[in-house]
Image: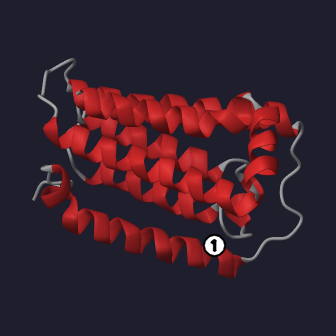
């Protein structure tokens, strides 16, 4: 599970740097330039994801707790809602106007759905860390940005776009879930 832990650590540290050390991020952007900084950030995130995926696949399963749910409709609906929230963070819809951190809330729903259906060590490491990371980011963003009033503009069309993209992402991931992760997301 070393590779999984390395990916999780890289993910957390890379995302935490701008929140925990904003002066360091500013200095990096100033010395590298905005686009090169974004490129390095993206490469680090890609490396983290690859480490997590291959670490997940190579990890030995050890039971930690008995999950309260199995794969099925409820956990799938939580993941779907999480994906819609996640994608609504990129458009100015009513969802984004009501939910301050739709991307982090979506990540938290996705992680919780998986923690409710998986009780093994690698699931606890991956989904537990991602849930903690989402809460950490919410706290740090709130601290940095202060009071929030919501978006002044909102479009139902934008919500529809987020919904369609969320459903499409859910369908694609669901289709390949067993091949990628070895688990059938909805037991038939």
Residue 60, image x, y percentages: 11, 28
Where is residue 5, by image quadrant? Answer: top left
- Residue 184 vs 23, above or below: the answer is below
Residue 12, image x, y percentages: 52, 33
- Residue 168 vs 5, above or below: the answer is below
Give the residue drawn at x 31%, y 27%: 124
Where is residue 153, by image quadrant? Answer: bottom right
Q: Is residue 165 left or right of 113 when viewed as pictured?
A: right
Give the residue drawn at x 41%, y 33%: 8
- Residue 101 vs 129, above or below: the answer is below
Residue 68 in sight from this viewpoint: no
Residue 15 in sight from this viewpoint: yes
Q: How is the image coloured?
A: secondary structure
Q: Is residue 129 left or right of 66 when viewed as pictured?
A: right
Give the residue drawn at x 75%, y 29%: 21
Q: Which residue is mark 1?
A: 159
Which quadrant holds the N terminus?
A: top left
Which quadrant holds the C terminus?
A: bottom left
Question: How many numbered discs, if any?
Answer: 1
Q: Classify 10 Å Cα crowding around label 1: few (below 14), some (14-19), many (20 and above).
A: many
Residue placed most toward the observer, 89 or 45: 45
Give the residue drawn at x 67%, y 82%: 157
Residue placed most toward the observer, 51 or 117: 51
- Residue 69 vs 174, above or below: the answer is above
Residue 182, image x, y percentages: 12, 50
Say what secondary structure mark 1 lies in.
helix
- Outermost front residue: 31
């Amino acid at each position: 599970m070393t590779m999984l832990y390395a990916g999780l650590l890289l993910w957390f540290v890379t995302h935490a740097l701008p929140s925990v050390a904003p002066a360091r991020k500013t200095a990096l952007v100033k010395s590298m330039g905005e686009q090169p900084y974004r490129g390095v950030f993206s490469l680090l995130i890609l490396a983290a994801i690859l480490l997590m995926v291959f670490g997940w696949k190579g990890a030995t399963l050890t039971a930690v707790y008995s999950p309260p749910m199995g794969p099925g409709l409820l956990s799938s609906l939580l993941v779907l809602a999480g994906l819609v929230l996640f994608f609504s963070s990129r458009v100015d819809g009513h969802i984004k106007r009501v939910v301050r951190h739709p991307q982090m809330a979506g990540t938290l729903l996705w992680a919780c759905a998986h923690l409710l259906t998986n009780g093994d060590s690698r699931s606890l490491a991956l989904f537990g860390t991602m849930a903690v990371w989402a809460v950490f980011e919410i706290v740090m963003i709130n601290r940095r940005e202060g009071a929030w009033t919501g978006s002044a503009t909102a479009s139902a069309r934008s919500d529809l776009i987020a919904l369609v993209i969320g459903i499409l992402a859910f369908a694609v991931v669901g289709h390949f879930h067993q091949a990628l992760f070895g688990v059938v997301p909805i037991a038939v």
